[in-house]
Structures are given as C-alpha cells and as structure tokens.
Amino acid sequence: MKTAKYITLSMLGLTMMGCNDSFLDRFPEDSLTEKSFFKSVSDLETYAYGLYNWGASTTDGVSDNVIYCEASSVFDKMNGQLTPEEVGQWGWGTLRSINFFLARAPQATGNEADINHFIGLGRLYRAKEYYGKVQSYSDVPWYSKDLQTTDTEELYKTQDPRALVVDSIMADLDFAVKNMKDGNSKTEIYKVVALAEQARIALNEGTFRKYHPELELNDYDRFLELAVQASETIMNNYDYEISNVPNGSMPPYRALFSSLDLSTNPEVILVMDNDKNLGRTYGIGTIFNYNHSISRDLMEDYLYITEDGKAVPFHTVPGYETMTVTEVYKNRDPRMAETLMPIGWQREWDKMPAQQKMEFGGYPQVKFCLDTPQDMWQWGTAYCDLPILRYATILLINAEAKAELGILTQEDLDKTINKIRGRVGVELPPAKLDEWLNNPDPVQMARYSNIKSTQAGAVAEVRHERRIELACEGYRYNDLMRWGCAKLLEKVPEGAYIPGYGYMDTNGDGVKDVGFFPDSESANEAKKDLTEEDLKNVSTQIIDDKSPIMFSEGDHGHILRTSQVQANWEWIEPKYYYTPISVRDININPNLKQNKFWAE
C-alpha cells in the first residue's frame, strides 16, 4: 500500500465516518460529501483501503505458550471477575463503516470487474470483522446494510443465531473469492488474501463446531471441506513457497521475523510494511524481557535431535525435567533458538550475552527481535517488516482440516508439514503418517484428549507442528478455544528449572549472574565465594513469602509466578468459551438476550 494513499484514505475515513464507535451513528442524509464521492473506481479504492483491518501479532499473549506477568481479561475470566456488569460494551462502528461503503459502492461508474473487486474487498472486510464478533459472542445481530436512526426495528432487534451469521459471512467470502482480482503486492489485499481468510474462518468454524457440542451444530465437515478447498486453491494456483531465503547471517526462519524488507520473500502473502522514516514502527522492548517469557510447556514441545539424526519428543530424553536453562537448548529443533533466547545470545552493542529476567521465567522471547541495530531497541521504534500472513499457515490449515476429516495422506504430509520441516536451517526428518497414526506421542494425545477423528494421532501431531511453527504469532489462544482445550489455561505456567539455592550462571558466559536464596543472610554468606567478576553483574533473588516468584518444589524446581499460584484459576466449560453481553448494551437494547452460557 502506498503511503500517500494510506494517509489520504485515513483522513477521508475520519472526515466521512468519524472515530465514534457508537451503534447509532449514521451519515447525514443530505451530505454533499457523500453525494459527490462514490462516483468512480478510484473513489472506491480510496475509501476501501481506509477500512484496512489487518495487523501482525508478535506475541502469544495469554496462553500456555507464555508466562504472562500482567493483568488480562483471560485472568479476570478465570478468577471470576469478568461479569456482564464489568465487561466492556461491543462496538459496531467498524461494521457500520463497511456497510456504509457497500451500500454506496454500486453507484460508481466504470469497469464492472473493477467495481466488483472493491465490493468484494468490502465484503471480505465485513466477513473478517463479523467473524471476530462470532468468536466472542457466538450469536450476534446480522446487519447487511448501514442503518439510519429511523430503522428502529433493525436497530433494536435481538441476536441472530450463529448458523445464520456464519452462513452470511461465508456468502461474503464466496463473493470476495469470485470477484476480487489477483495482484503482486504484499501490502494490498487481493484474491489470495480472501482465499486465505476463507480457509482460516472455515477451519476455525469447522473445528469450533466439532469440539463444542453445546452449540448443537453438527455440520462441521462442510466447513473443514471448504478449508481444504480454499487452501488447496492457493497451493495449486499461486507461486508461494516455504522461504529458504536467509538475511545475512540469519537463517531463513528467523529472517521472516527480523528483516527490513519482506516484499520479495516467497513465503509472505501479506506484510506489515514498517518504515522508520514514516513512523510505522512496533516495540521490541515489549517482546523481550518486558512482561512475559516463554513457558516450559512450549519449550519442551520442541523436538530433540538424537545422535543418529532422529527427531524425538524432548520428554523421552533422560533427565529432561531437571535440565537447567543452560542445558535445554542442546540438540533441539533449530526453531527453538529462534523463538526463545538461546544461551550466549548477544546484541552487537552489548559487552556480554543478554541476561534473561528470571523473575519472568527465564526464557525470553527473541522471535521478532534483532540483535542489531541498536535504534530498534528504543521504546516502540523497531521498523522491520512483519509478516501478517505467510504460506506456512496455509499449509498447516490444509493438513489440519484433512486430518480432522480423516483423509490425510503421506502425499499430503509431504506437500505441507514436510515442506515446513524441510526449511533450510530447520531440516528436521520428514514426518511419517504411519508413525503418527500407530505411535503418536502420548504427551500430545493426553494434551488433546478430546480429539474426534479416525486419524486422531495425525490431528494431535499437526496441532503440535502448528504450535511450534507459529509460536508467538498470536494464534495459540484461539487454537485452544476452537479445539475445546482451554482447560489447559488453568495450569499455572512454569519457567526454567532451578536446582536449588545459590549463585549460578544463567546466560552461559561463565560468570555467575543471579542467585536464589531463602533470606539475605544466606545470600550474603554465599557472596563471599564469588569472584570480583561475578560481583560486577550478579543479582540476588530472595524467595520468601513476599517474592514475586516461587519454586515448584519449595527450595528448588521450576519457576512459578507467586500471584498466579495464589489465583487458583478455573476455566468453566462451556461458559468461558464465550463473552457475556454487557448489561449496558442490554439496557440500550432490551431485546438483546444475555449469552445463554452466561445467563443465570
């Protein structure tokens, strides 16, 4: 997307629509701006791009992939503090803006295919925005036009059933796929993005219906079949491929998340085109050592490479439970060291390897973090391009949908999972379907014990592959929700293993840098044995009843956040898979019904 266009359309959106998210906002019927606009394809292009609503995520937020150390709505829910009285109101301003556009786009003159392309783009935006509401509330009112204040019956109607709303979303996506054009830009939305969104939503809806019997919607196979169809259309008709393009010394996987320019990367379908000079930036400081670290649970999911070149589960390695933070990286899936900070990781301006914050768990995230240049590490100043949508995601959708349908073949695996495993710099042994089906990993099978498929082992292993490949890209929480596995969030996430009290080297530079003690007296006594070099950098953690962390086994074990242990989280099923309707919204529209899973 050209910057000048982006600024123009953003200003136009403010002029024509305003920033107000109020449900009752409407466009003045006698507006000269409206009457003089929407006349040409160029007008449609300008307005439609002002509705752009894609972004990139750089963390997994609250999920079993991370130890998240701040307050969140997920914690509030599991603590019983999220209620209809306290929950935020839903907003309809974005959908109002989209419907405003769709109602007026047909009046433009010009090439019909060009006009239909932008109408398709608008319907794609509507599908994406509406499905976000379905994911939160399930049943929501469906509006296919922008309402005026005189449309009182529509304004004050109750929710439409999920089945109707999702079918309407699918109709929007079908129109978008059939009418949008192909294009080469990775910053503008073309047909391939519509296909990808069709595949994503179809997989999400198919698996959600399959693993949420409380909905009483058993037609999930048709959505899974659509996910296969849409993903294979991309696989068979576009030239995307798993990237084997390094960036200097960066291997290809890391280069996807730490490059200044992804415009020619063969794996990236849609990119957030950041630019230092234009102020399009994000924050590395909020990713690395700020308010979260990677969990032990995710760390242990990376495969271990044996001496004879086999990839085996980490839990089969003798003594894995008590390996320290300096030991767990040896012989692992190479993506682990591109996601969790490896021992010895050092930014070019640092005098010594970076020090992880053990009070966050000890496994800082380095995915999306460069070791150079230094100006990216100021607050919110990073300007690498960020992948919003990449081809690996499409391959994972295809493999998962087929496994859920029970039709996954070895040929399918070779076209999907093994393409990802074969990435230069990763190069894991190829997955074998027979092994997945006949000898599935018991840890994965126990984690996803509710799988309903004739290829249950394959489903579990595809979920495993998805977790590793897409770690820290914002997918994990929703994956647990759609799989009906959010009970996993009840478990307090664990961090690195600490063998006992004392000072130790945690970043591999040979100098002791942190110590854990039950009291200051024992810490001071232990300091007498430290070298002068140790004393320059060492910090001390007192593990008492005031400490933010504790150990799983009392005086040793895996790091736990004290507040999270004390929270006593509970995930109530099926209630917590849905968001309650705010009582303020019900007061505005008494015809709304409280979400049935939250109704007392």
Image (tube, rainbow, N blue to C red):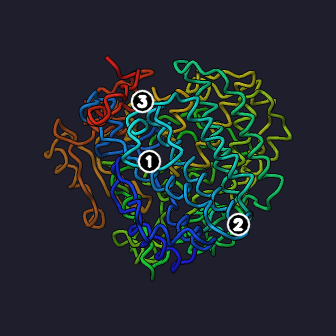
Q: Please, what is the three-letter code of the amino acid marked with disc 2?
A: Asp
Mark 1 → mark 3, Cα distance in angstroms: 15 Å
* Quadrant of residue 546 within the rendered picture: top left
Mark 2 → mark 1, Cα distance in angstroms: 26 Å
- The residue singled out by tag 3 in the image is 158
Instruction: Give left or right: position of 223 versus 407.
Output: left
Q: Please, what is the three-letter code of the amino acid marked with disc 3?
A: Thr
Q: Please, what is the three-letter code of the amino acid marked with disc 1?
A: Leu
Residue 414 position within the rendered picture, expressed as x and y whole percent measured from the top left: 82, 45
Q: Which of disc 2 and disc 3 is earlier in sequence?
A: 2
Mark 3 → mark 2, Cα distance in angstroms: 36 Å
Task: Residue at 53%, 36% (x, y): give it.
Answer: 320
User: Which of the two discs, 2 and 1, sits closer to the camera?
Assistant: 1
The numbered dot on residue 114 is 2
How many marks overall? 3
Task: Look at the picture and state if 86 lies above or below 242.
Answer: above
